[in-house]
Image (spheres, coloured by chain):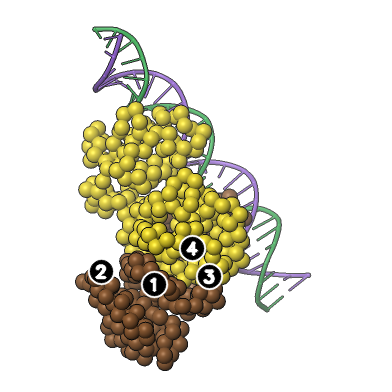
Chain colours: A brown, B yellow, C green, D purple
Amino acid sequence: MTPRVLVVDDDVALARALAINLRAHGYQVLVAHDGRQALSEAGRSDPAVVVLDLGLPDLDGIQVLQGIRGWSTMPVIVLSARSTSAEKVAALDAGADDYVTKPFGMEELLARVRAAVRRGRPATGVEQAAMVTEDFTVDLAARRVAAADGTPIRLTPTEWGVLEVLVRNVGKMVPQRQLLTEVWGPAYEGESHYLRVYLAQLRRKLEPDPAHPRHLITEAGMGYRFEQ
Amino acid sequence: MTPRVLVVDDDVALARALAINLRAHGYQVLVAHDGRQALSEAGRSDPAVVVLDLGLPDLDGIQVLQGIRGWSTMPVIVLSARSTSAEKVAALDAGADDYVTKPFGMEELLARVRAAVRRGRPATGVEQAAMVTEDFTVDLAARRVAAADGTPIRLTPTEWGVLEVLVRNVGKMVPQRQLLTEVWGPAYEGESHYLRVYLAQLRRKLEPDPAHPRHLITEAGMGYRFEQ
DNA sequence: GGCCGGTGTCAAGGACACGTCAAGATCCGC
DNA sequence: GCGGATCTTGACGTGTCCTTGACACCGGCC
């Protein structure tokens, strides 16, 4: 599947040059010459990357960017003749993935397009809001935990802090140091005893058999791991 | 949850300036001054973003980048004094997410860090960066090893440390001295007996026929090598 | 064959990390 | 200021892991 690139530039010559080079490197290229076209084309053809010149006749380039960001997280590489710091910051904070100052080398732009395509995107920005296991459910958004039968389980703030870090890293081993700094702060790196106390409490509240935990796993000498 | 940023720069003053600014903007900052530190820190603390200066004393910055890309898709922002097109292309194609030429404005860098953190890591929870062999799988990001049939294999911290170094250098011979210093510390350079003990344990846990290892290879008199 | 350096294997001890319980200390709402 | 919940700290039994030593093995070399 050849990736689609949407080139947005009112400079017809430059847009054509970009299109030719991108096609020569195996991309399928769509071109828009103003902001409206850009927005409609982005919505219609869902490109893998957008190359967006900020200087457009009808809309401000930032507005186009915001228009795209309203519904999509597709990578956008911004082109601009302006090289001031403020301009770059504004574009990047509006959601641009990259900022290239004109004049630029074609090879460089192609490399940045490759980088943008490569890192791709999960098309849907779905947030994993809840962690469901056989024995309980952790709702990260609502900050609530419930047993399998639905009865709520009360956690103290610190218990929740520990559980949250582990659930966010489900399947991954979380080093003790990371848990301590994220829950208690960097000054508590050495207090691994806290972890033992709180993991025990969490197990008593969550595990069907706290002596043989299935979800809150100890990796001796390293850290802990949450298993679904 | 404050995002972690790993700053890699041998220029102590610049690294400190970056760290101060990033901390002032609410990031948790880790600093490494050479390539080895950078790789081990990236593996140990799994930062949200890496800011990597290409000019390092021990390793080429590109090598560090490749070392990280061997097992992780974490965003990497490359800093460099070189502004030639070829340099940029090389770094971007090696897996960099962004390329910033020195000197740069702090505001711009902060904006690029924000952009990198924002587009975040779709990799969370998804199994994608792992060393897969016929007989077992080593997931460096999750710090987990599983047999071919999926049953998890328990490793002790030291066993894991040895395996991690070897896997990160897959195909390359790792000298005994390097293994000892990276796992046990520089004071243990002479304790090559440790290696024999731990390689034996790893083989017993990982190799189908521990007496005739296929993946954990001894290079007699020199070191060890991991083969996929 | 005997020697020797480097290697693989096994087992045991002691050090260390872990889980557990419970008693202070501290915080917070009332 | 009071009382309850929550966090910290200590002590202890248990289990795991690291270290260390003893010994067999293999290859090359004298």
- Element type at mark 3: helix
- The first of marks 1 and 2 along the sequence is 2
* Residue B16 spot, x, y in % from top left: 60, 56
> Which residue is rendered at x = 43% and y = 68% of the image?
B120
Q: Is residue A129 visible?
A: no
Give how far apart the Cα atoms at labels 4 and 2 are.
Answer: 26 Å
Marks 4,3: beta carbons within 8 A:
no
Q: CA distance from mark 3 to mark 2?
A: 30 Å
- Dots 4 and 2: beta carbons under 8 Å? no
The residue type indicated by label 4 comes to Thr
Is label 2 in a helix, a strand or a loop?
loop
Q: Chain of mark 2?
A: A
Viewer-proximal residue among B40 and A62: A62
Per the image, the residue denoted by label 4 is B101
Q: Position of residue A133 (x, y in %)?
A: 36, 66
- Where is residue B68 shown, x and y percent of the image? 39, 54
Question: How far is mark 4 from mark 3, CA to CA?
Answer: 11 Å
Which residue type does callout 3 highlight?
Glu
Marks 3,2: beta carbons within 8 A? no
Q: Residues within 10 Å of mark 2 (few under 14, many from 20)?
A: few
Q: Amino acid at mark 2?
A: His
- Read off the residue under disc 2: A25
Q: Mark 1 to mark 2: distance in Å?
A: 36 Å
Label 3: chain? Answer: B
The residue under label 1 is: A128
Residue B25 visible within the image: yes
